[in-house]
Each structure stands twice: as C-alpha cells, then as structure tokens.
Image: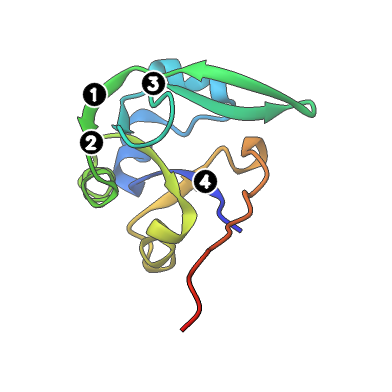
C-alpha cells in the first residue's frame, strides 16, 4: 500500500504555524511535485468525503527527491508518498501534518514476465 503524507521541517512549522485543516494550506507555501496528478489540487478526506484543496506553490519541482530536499530546507509543505520521507520523519528533519485528513492508502500491483 502507498500512502501520501504532507510534511514540512520543524523550523518551517515553528515560523509559519502548523495547519490543522486542509483549508489552512491557503496560508502556507507549498512544494508541488509535478508528477502527481493535479499537483496544485491536493485531495483529502473530511467527514468521510473526499475534498480537493487548491494550494499555492512556492516551488514546483519535477522529482520527489527535490520536493523532499526543499521541505527539509524549510521552503514549505510538500505532499509526497510516505515511504519517500519515512527516514526523515524518523530522524526528525520532517514532520507530517494533516494526518487525520489523508486519503486511504492506495494498493500497489506489480506485473512482470516469468523467468
């Protein structure tokens, strides 16, 4: 299963505050990773209904590593797959936000040819 996570550095959150609802993202700088579908509209769940929140990009990047690096560099809030930031979260260089609003993890299927 693949889950998304919104994350930012502790320093960014100390300076700008921690969003408590998806709507709070309007007051934050966001780091957009272009490869995600509709990168400027992040989807969340509120009251068991999926909602789409338009985010204001401070930085748009073309790969997930750049998004994670920018978040660690205090540039803003990034939304990436959790497994990309798990080590940084464990190390304390990134903190997840809006966990209660994240969508359900997506199943992953791999196909390969035999042999």
Circles 3 and 4 in contact, beta carbons < 8 Å: no
State which mark lies toward you, 2 or 1. 1
Which secondary structure, mark 1? strand
Query: On the image, numbered disc 3 is attached to which residue?
Result: 40
State which mark lies toward you, 1 or 3. 3
Number of residues whose C-alpha sits closer than 10 Å to that of mark 1, classed few (under 14), some (14–19) or many (20 or more): few
State which mark lies toward you, 3 or 2. 3
Number of residues whose C-alpha sits closer than 10 Å to that of mark 2, classed few (under 14), some (14–19) or many (20 or more): many
Circles 2 and 1 in contact, beta carbons < 8 Å: yes
* Mark found first going from the N terminus, 1 or 3: 3
Cα gap from disc 3 to disc 2, whole angstroms? 16 Å
* Mark found first going from the N terminus, 3 or 4: 4
Where residue 75 appears, x then y in whole percent? 23, 36
Residue at 21% across, 35% down: 61
Which secondary structure, mark 2? loop
Query: On the image, numbered disc 2 is attached to which residue?
Result: 75
Q: In this view, does 35 lie above or below 96?
A: above
Q: Residue 58 carries which label?
A: 1
Where residue 43 appears, x then y in whole percent? 56, 27
- The image shows a total of numbered marks equal to 4
* Mark found first going from the N terminus, 4 or 2: 4
Residue at 52% across, 64% down: 111
Cα gap from disc 2 to disc 1, whole angstroms? 8 Å
Locate the N terminus and report the quarter of the image it occupies. bottom right
Where residue 23 appears, x then y in whole percent? 54, 18
* Mark found first going from the N terminus, 4 or 1: 4
Q: Please give left or right for residue 41 compared with residue 104 in the image.
A: left
* Mark found first going from the N terminus, 2 or 1: 1
Query: On the image, numbered disc 4 is attached to which residue?
Result: 4
Circles 3 and 2 in contact, beta carbons < 8 Å: no
């Amino acid at each position: 299963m693949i889950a998304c996570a919104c994350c930012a550095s502790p320093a960014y959150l100390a300076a700008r505050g921690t969003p408590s609802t998806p709507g709070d993202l309007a007051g934050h700088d966001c780091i957009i990773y272009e490869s995600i579908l509709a990168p400027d509209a992040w989807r969340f769940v509120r009251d068991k209904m999926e909602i789409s929140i338009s985010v204001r990009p401070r930085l748009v990047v073309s790969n997930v590593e750049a998004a994670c690096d920018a978040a660690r560099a205090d540039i803003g809030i990034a939304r990436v797959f959790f497994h990309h930031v798990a080590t940084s979260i464990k190390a304390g260089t990134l903190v997840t936000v809006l966990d209660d609003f994240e969508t359900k993890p997506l199943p992953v299927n791999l196909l390969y040819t035999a042999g």
